Image (cartoon, helix red, strand yellow):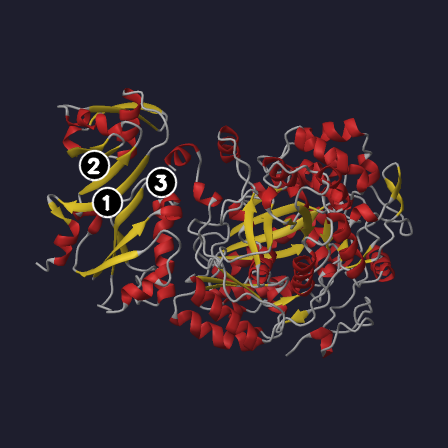
Amino acid sequence: MLIFKFTKTDNSSLVAHVDTLRAVTYIFRRAKVDVEYSKGFNPHMELGFSAPISLGIESVAEYVSAKADFQPDALDKLNANCPKGIQFLAMFNKKVNLAATLNRAEYILTANGIGNVIDQILAPNYTISYTEKKVEVQKDVSSRIFSATRIDDNNAKVVLACGNANLRPDRLVLHLMATNNLTGDYKIVKTQMFVDDIPADEFLCNNN
Amino acid sequence: MTKLTDSVQKPYRYFGGEFNTPDINKPADVRFCMCVADSYEVGMSNLGVRILYYLFNSIDKVVCERCYAPFADYEQYLKDNNLPLASLETQTPLANFDFVGFSIQYEMCYSNIFYMLELAGIPVTTAERGENFPFVVAGGPCSVNLEPMYKYFDFIFVGEGETPWKQIIEDYKLLKGTMSKSEFLRHVDEKYDCIYVPSLHPSKYNGDKVVTVPNKKVWWNIENNLDEMFTPQVQLVPNIELVHNRAVAELFRGCANGCRFCQAGFIYRPVRERSADCAFELCKNLLESTGYDELSLTSLSTSDYSGLMPLLEKLLPYAREHNVQLNLPSLRLDSFKGDMAMGNRKSSLTFAPEAGTQRLRDVINKNITEENIMSALTDAFNQGYTSVKLYFMLGLPTETMEDVEGIYNLACKIKSLYKWIKKSGKDLRISVSCSTFIPKPFTPFQWCAFADRESIEQKQRYLAENLRKKGINFSYNDYDGSLMEAILARGGRTVADALYQAYKNGARFDAWSDMFKWEHYQKAFTDCGVDIPKIVGAYDLDEPLPWDYVDIGVTKKFLQNEYKKAMQATTTPSCNKQCNGCGLNAKGYCKDAHGNVKY
């Protein structure tokens, strides 16, 4: 099984997860990188993706697995066939369920003054509020926050749970902005993923 | 960017970034913004836009970008942030282009043209724009009668655009800066017989009836050779799901059948086929450049394509090898053969008998019999099809209640046929869909009246009650929407002011049945004194028609004869069987034998 690391930035960050699955399938088909098809009634390319990210979040650390044999020139072929914002960065040869295994992600958060208040999220029982399906939700998310670092006034770095136990960084940012009266637009970039404490790239390189 | 994603659904549709986007950043002397007055998802499937987009971008120092109608959330976002409507590719405001062109595929998008122009800060009328704004131009099938929009377009391109458009853009590149906008309009009006500049050709009306038509004969341009014509071998691949998310290959233009209600069947005459070899190359190139796993072979009547068998001999193995699903839309019943449905998923078949009795099918010249229908369906059911969709029209000329009962009877017979073949198992899933007949310019029915509300609604009620009892799904079009389309299709210059008024009253996205509100138009027509019955009623065969200035190559005499034959329920054979003398053969457009087919 091949694992590819790719970016989802620029215009492609505006594409929802379900549409990204399709877009990546088309990239593989254009690139003529052979991937096995399922044998069912509706044959589809056997691809598996890391956990979805919210619309508008840019990422330089998305992963997709493909049921395929090793192909040395696959990266070049894929990169010649990508739309704006998608680029393939690395290829690994390992069998792994990405969505279940890659369980943490690092994000850079950008908003006016966010660097100066990022410490707040490390408070015990840190609780955020957001609306889901038109209902106001209060949730203790402290167990899903692993680190928070100030970069400068307007930038901060956080590591949050992702996958089955997930914390959406946009909800965290909007809550922080609301509780601290921070105004203006904001931006989130996902910079890397982890398997617990191990960076995903390191984990995927290791063949054990 | 994230404020945008919080407030706007699927923002991607306003920014593009599709694979196969041509080089948009090259130095350019001419900038053209190609617009579709509908959403991104609908507009992206427009074949005409696709061709011209790649054609313009292939010209040295010419850049063509795109723009689609935004939904209310993005409209609000633009207003909140004080932004004008801009192109997808480089986010350039529409007002900064040399040309803003609308491809007009159907009448119900007119209100969105006002909507887009106003969001772009471009005055809607030619007169208000003067020298300072881009040329606002139009093309597409509706160009056969854009008189209802005459004062909003600087010029209208009539017919198929591949060859002349290139020349027009080259002309502009050469002349830009040396002449004013109005001088350029006079230039193209004189030079091109397929260009119509409404402001240069006045027209006189008495009430809502035209008295003097514009004094230029505008020729509907016909592309003569599909193999040599500019044909993009690539297609934009959007990253979001479209209405039609697949590669689309055009097999041929025109249709030999001459169904009397069908505008496309007359304006796209004669039949012009791509050779099977070129068609296969096109399919292969489109699939390879897009990565799509679904291919649609398109034309007005795919199974009439004389090269279908040689094409499928190559295409079927290719599709199997590359996991591609084939779609063959627009099948005619009489030419449907079981083997054409092939090894693909046997899901649903769609057929359009259009009318419920043989008499009415003869009136509309839909040359199929009940026997054809039953034998085609017998094949299909034996092949394993379990679902059938049937399309009909209500309100056709000469229609009586007996014809409507015929729709019900036909649906019931198909149901029992399935039972008889299958003996056991699940029932056939069958749905009947009835649109309302709309008389369109350049058809033999252009003189016919649009049916009145009472009769249409009575027929719809009859079918709804009876078909539902039999477990047959029934759907139909709302009368108001059809009436509106009838007004736009046959209206003249006298409705122009009311259309803008209706937009001001709130009309937009009229083609979306959930968004269309007849009240907006009703009020505008009353305020502007438009006499609706005059426009949608019957016309005399010899009275002037607002669109008489357009020449599609088919003579008025032929259409009149077809009208008379219709009233006697006499059919006219397909062009493939004999030449019926519509006028195009006489003009030298039918080169190949047997109605211009190649094989």
Residue B439 appears in the rendering: no
| SS category of the residue bearing label 2 | strand
Residue A191 badge: 1
Q: Chain of mark 3?
A: A
Q: Is residue B342 left or right of residue A15?
A: right
Q: Chain of mark 1?
A: A
Category of crowding for the residue at label 3, using alpha-carbon neighbours closer than 10 angstroms: few (below 14), some (14–19), many (at least 20): many
Q: Chain of mark 2?
A: A
Residue placed under numbered mark 2 in the picture: A157
Nearest to viewer (mark 1 / mark 3): 1
Q: Are marks 1 and 2 in contact (CB under 8 Å)?
A: yes
Rendered position, B22 above or below B307: above
Residue placed under numbered mark 3 in the picture: A55
Task: Identify the amino acid type marked 3.
Answer: Leu
Rendered position, A120 above or below B211: above
Q: CA distance from mark 1 to mark 2?
A: 9 Å
Q: Nearer the viewer, residue B80 or B525?
A: B80
| SS category of the residue bearing label 3 | loop
